[in-house]
Amino acid sequence: MIDRKKLLIRSASLIIFIFVINYIAMKFYWYYSIWYFDMPMHFLCGFWVGLACIYIFSLKEFNFQFILKVLICVFLIGFFWEIFEILVNKSITQNPFNILDTLSDMFFDLAGGGVSIIYFFKRIVYN
């Protein structure tokens, strides 16, 4: 049995945490001074997107299709975010395209999404 209220509370708490950390990071230029800072942020955002997709899909049966649907959703949102980032970097900040950064970001998005599925089964469904 899915506890949708618990899932919603944890998702809302996580997005507030991400917002606060991102605000502090922007204020203190952590994205520029700490080269790897975007990695845990992409992981957390992938984790949140995974939880949000689980909440939206909330199927009665949990099978491989459910897991695949969540991961595809996380991938697509991460992919479109990277396109947005590339366009902003190209037009506003004039930073060159970095394929390694993009692949790293996508990896951490998907890793966060995968962990959100594990978290969901261990803490929400079976707890």
Image: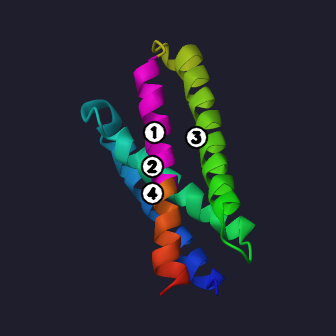
Disc 3 marks a residue whose amino acid type is Gly
Disc 2 marks a residue whose amino acid type is Ala
Q: Which type of secondary structure does the marked residue at label 4 adopt?
A: helix
Q: Where is residue 100 in the image (x, y as percent from the top left)?
A: 41, 23
Left or right: 77 as drawn, with respect to 85: right
Q: Which of marks 3 and 4 is nearer the N terminus?
A: 4
User: Which residue is under mark 4?
Assistant: 18
Q: Earlier in the sequence, mark 4 or mark 1?
A: 4
Residue at 73 percent of width and 66 percent of height: 57
CA gap between label 2 and label 3 equals: 11 Å
Q: Is the magenta stretch mostly helix, strand or loop?
A: helix
User: Which residue is under mark 1?
Assistant: 107
Disc 1 residue crowd, few under 14, some 14–19, many 20+, Cα 10 Å: some
State which mark lies toward you, 4 or 1. Answer: 1
State which mark lies toward you, 4 or 2. Answer: 2
Q: Earlier in the sequence, mark 3 or mark 1?
A: 3
CA gap between label 4 and label 2 equals: 16 Å
The magenta segment is 98-113
Disc 4 marks a residue whose amino acid type is Ile
Q: Which of 80 and 61 is in front in this view?
A: 61
User: Which residue is under mark 2?
Assistant: 111
Q: Which type of secondary structure does the marked residue at label 1 adopt?
A: helix
21 versus 104 height, above or below = below
Report if the CB atoms under discs 2 and 1 are less than 8 Å apart: yes
